[in-house]
């Protein structure tokens, strides 16, 4: 597979257990070659609502129903790790977020009760740099 370029706000469809495909969005650079990715998923009654996105103007086209960022499923990856998980045949990237949506997702991470403390610290450090 060709080298993948990761830009903040890019969304990638990756294969994750147990149910297969999930969208992950790059929200922060955590080192020279690693990025923090968060999962976007359909809103449920038990969902954390630190960042909710609804379809419409300004929202990425892959948001087709009310969705939330599921910060508890965040992961740190480099391009090689990401490449090994991308769903075969999926566009790379699957889509992108605008700067304003990316900022909403990042700010949601700072207030999330479900984002791991180490990822929250990395996000805070990135935003303060």
Image (cartoon, grey):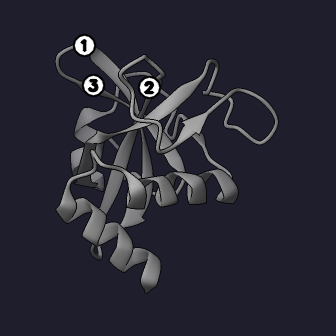
- Residue at 17% from the left image edge and 16% from the top image edge: 18
Q: Classify mark 3: helix, strand or loop.
A: strand
Task: Give me the disc on residue 15.
Answer: 3
Residue bearing mark 2? 41
Quadrant for residue 69, please give it: top left
Residue bearing mark 1? 19
- Residue at 66% from the left image edge and 29% from the top image edge: 54
Q: Classify mark 1: helix, strand or loop.
A: loop
Q: Residue 66, relative to residue 40: is it above or below?
A: above
Q: Dot 1, how many residues are within 10 Å of its Cα: few (below 14), some (14-19), or many (20+)?
A: few
Residue 34: x and y in percent read: 27, 64
Q: Residue 56, relative to residue 121: is it above or below?
A: above
Q: Dot 3, how many residues are within 10 Å of its Cα: few (below 14), some (14-19), or many (20+)?
A: some
Residue 124: x and y in percent read: 37, 73
- Residue at 40% from the left image edge and 57% from the top image edge: 111
Q: Is residue 94 visible?
A: yes
- Nearer to us of marks 3 and 2 is 2
Quadrant for residue 1, please give it: top left
Disc 3/disc 2 C-alpha distance (Å): 14 Å
Q: Residue 50, relative to residue 46: is it above or below?
A: below
- Nearer to us of marks 2 and 1 is 2
Disc 2/disc 1 C-alpha distance (Å): 12 Å
Chain-order first, disc 3 or disc 2: 3
Disc 1/disc 3 C-alpha distance (Å): 8 Å
Q: Dot 2, how many residues are within 10 Å of its Cα: few (below 14), some (14-19), or many (20+)?
A: some
Q: Is residue 5 visible?
A: no
- Residue at 43% from the left image edge and 86% from the top image edge: 129
Q: Is the residue under label 1 in contact with that under label 2 (CB below 8 Å)? A: no
**Extreme residue in the right direction:** 57
Residue 95: x and y in percent read: 59, 38
């Amino acid at each position: 597979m060709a080298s993948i370029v990761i830009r903040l706000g890019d969304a990638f469809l990756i294969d994750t257990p147990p149910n297969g495909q999930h969208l992950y969005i790059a929200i922060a650079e955590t080192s020279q070659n690693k990025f923090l990715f968060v999962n976007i998923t359909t809103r449920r009654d038990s969902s954390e609502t630190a960042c909710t996105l609804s379809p419409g103007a300004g929202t990425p086209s892959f948001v087709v129903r009310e969705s939330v960022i599921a910060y508890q499923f965040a992961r740190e990856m480099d391009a090689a790790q990401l490449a090994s998980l991308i769903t075969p045949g999926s566009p790379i990237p699957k889509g992108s977020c605008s700067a304003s949506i990316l900022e909403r997702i990042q700010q949601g991470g700072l207030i999330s009760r479900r984002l791991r403390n180490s990822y929250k610290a990395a996000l805070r450090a990135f935003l303060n740099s």
